[in-house]
Image (cartoon, rainbow, N blue to C red):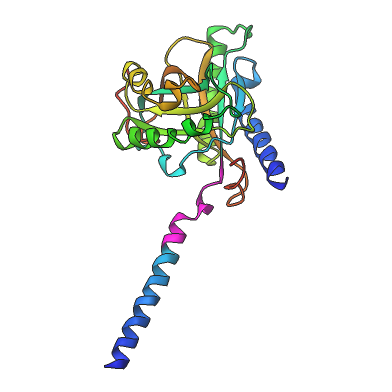
Amino acid sequence: MRKTIFSHVLLLSLLAIADSAFVQAQTQPNAKPAQYFFVVLNRPANPPQLSKEAGEKLQEEHMANIRKMAAEHKLVIAGPFTDDTTLRGIFCVASGISGAGTRVGQ
Amino acid sequence: MASFVLRAESAAQAQEWANSDPAIKAGRLAAEVHGPWLIDPSAIHDPAEPPGMEQYTLVLMKRGKKWDPNAPGFMDVMKQHPAFVKQMTEQGNMAIAGPFPFSDPGELRGVAIFRVGTEQTAKLTQDDPTVKAGLLKTEIHPWITGKGVLAPGQPVQ
């Protein structure tokens, strides 16, 4: 009887350890970098004028670069503003050293 | 001190990555880096398949008339802000929000992305204790991003 209780307690504590290790593994920031930076994309005062074709080509390159940075997990949020101001869009980039940055800037 | 160096390195890296954008290289866009942006990483997901876009409202939280971290009572009001963010998130109004550290200079003190339209966002943010007290003011813009990246928004207008 005593032995059974003991092994139950042992099993429970082993489960508890396994459980907390699992939770830790799930919440460890290793999968994602520790720091995020918010980038505001503005239209400069005097942007170079482009032909329609050159403008379209540049837009395609801009989108291709966004897809590339997203695939590399550097860019985690991106999007344009849909009103018409000098603010054109934002990037949120994931940067820094994994696990080392959580205390930074607090 | 070490953390300062790390942060500086990360900000420089963020700037470098942003500058890899062809539109920035061509001088059609200019990148302004803020951060680190102190957000909950679990609010960000991979884009949905098939890809699409959804409508959000992005709020730039800027210094208000009464912004003064050294003023008595300033921190008391700031401490009420997380409860407002929690409430907005739980009610399904907000997708993600985070401040920039006090050490990050400039007007922009934080960014919040709402899942509802601009008018409703304007109404909701009036109840933010930091806005009520004049510590922060809001600049509200309609904004779209990839479907699935944040908690669901609205159909694109």
Quarter-of-image position of residue B155: top left
Residue B65 position within the rendered picture, expressed as x and y whole percent measured from the top left: 53, 16
Tell me if residue A104 is in the magenta stretch: no
Q: Residue at x 59, y 47 (%)?
A: A103
Is residue A68 in sight in this rendering? yes
Q: Front-most of B120 and A95?
A: B120
Relative image position of residue B75 (x, y in whole percent): 52, 33
Instruction: Using the rendered image of the protein, determine whether residue A77 is visible from the camera's viewpoint.
Output: no
Above or below residue B128? Residue B142 is: above
Q: Position of residue B66 (x, y in %)?
A: 53, 19
| Predominant secondary structure, magenta span | helix
Name the residue rendered at 31%, 19% in the picture: B120
Find the magenta span and give its range.
A23-35
| Position of residue B92 measured from the top left corner of the image (x, y, whole percent) | 30, 33
Q: Quadrant of the C terminus of chain B?
A: top left
Q: Which quadrant would the N terminus of chain B be assigned to in this image?
A: top right
Residue B52 shown left or right of residue A81 in the figure: left
The quarter of the displayed image where residue B96 is located: top left
Along the line of sight, the residue nearer the viewer: A105 or B136: B136
Q: Nearer the viewer, residue A65 or A77?
A: A77
Q: Residue at x 43, y 33 (%)?
A: B81
The answer to which of A80 and B103 lies nearer the viewer is B103
Query: Seen from this angle, which residue lies furthest front?
Result: B72
